[in-house]
Amino acid sequence: QDDSYNPPLMPNEVITETDALTALEAEWLDLCHRTPDATPFQTPMWLLPWWRAFGSDDLTVIAARDETGLRSLAPLYVIRDEDESLGLFIGTGISDYLDVLGDAALIMPVLAGIDCQLWDLQQLRPSSTMLQTTLPDGWSENVEDQEPCPTLSINGAGAELENLISTHFRKKIRYYRRALERLGDVIVETPAPDTLDDLLTAFFDLHTARWKRRNLPGVLADETAQRFHREVAPRMLAQGMLRMYATRVAGRIVAVFYGFALHGTVYYYLSGYDPDLEKLSIGTLIVAHAIEEAVRDGAATFDFLRGAEEYKYAWGATDRMNRRRQLFKG
């Protein structure tokens, strides 16, 4: 006799109002903690600010429940233009990973019944249940590779940064650290609630200054983007998920690392540094510090996120390919 108890599923809910989605935050965050492969980009600390800053058209979040509570969540919205409709994950565009929380099989029947001609589900990791879930009757699909996300295994607690990189790379880091110290006292600080806003301002300024040297605005020059991160960062800090390091030389902030952590992985989202110190590899030094801290924290993986930039592979990172699944009605 099978004594296992499988609680019956409760009616699924489609959330269409921002207030109702905000009210779900505690359950949503709990589901993130219960989902081992959830990333910070599926948390309410990231997606609620994203919706307030960038969202448009029809909020269409699918929540699947049973008697024990929230089992699965698909943070979606639909863009409508005359007779056409396009469904996307909340967070599409600036989020490196997108996905359903929990089992996508609980979500798919509801998704198929929503008035939407095309669901363009982007930045799915290879392990995503949304890639493995059976296509609804009457639907067709296109699945393709999208973007690589180089990741570095740091072997959890006990690993040393020097064991992860080549002898030549270790010597370069030591050389540039000594060169930086000749400019003045070097201190790396982490944010507290009362210092976070000032560190964010320095981060925005440094990131923008670097891109201005290339006659480009950079992704943080926009006021909406800055307002978004000023809401995200304190929410991540309160949950212990923010990984932010600011390097001061002679009291002046010259580099900032901005990332997140969840379930044993540290995610390198962006950084900013003084372009006048580029010859001292200040960007490499702030990443080195972040990896060292990840090792000390016992993280298993350091994720460089989207993009095949050469410097990521210098650290020994290897590609994990994000995928895209498009579902067509009819």
Image (cartoon, rainbow, N blue to C red):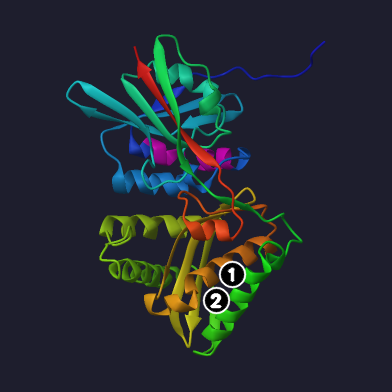
Q: Is residue 12 above or below residue 161?
A: above
Q: Nearer the viewer, residue 77 or 180?
A: 180
Q: Quadrant of the N terminus?
A: top right
What residue is shown at x 53% (from left), y 29% (from top)? Answer: 72
Image coordinates of residue 214 in percent, x first then y, are 29, 66
Is residue 29 on the magenta stretch? Answer: yes
Q: Main secondary structure of the magenta part?
A: helix
Is residue 240 at least partly visible in the picture?
no
What residue did someone put label 1 on?
Answer: 289
Q: Which residue, as the protein is rendered here, is positioned at the far left? A: 82
The image quarter in which residue 266 lies: bottom right
Question: Which label sits on residue 104?
Answer: none
Q: Residue tagged by mark 2?
A: 188
Secondary element under disc 1, as helix, strand or loop, is helix
Kindly identify the amino acid type of the residue bearing the numbered disc 1.
Answer: His
At 47% from the left and 28% from the top, the residue drawn is 63
Q: Residue at x 43, y 19 (%)?
A: 110
Vertical position of residue 238 compared to residue 255: above or below: above
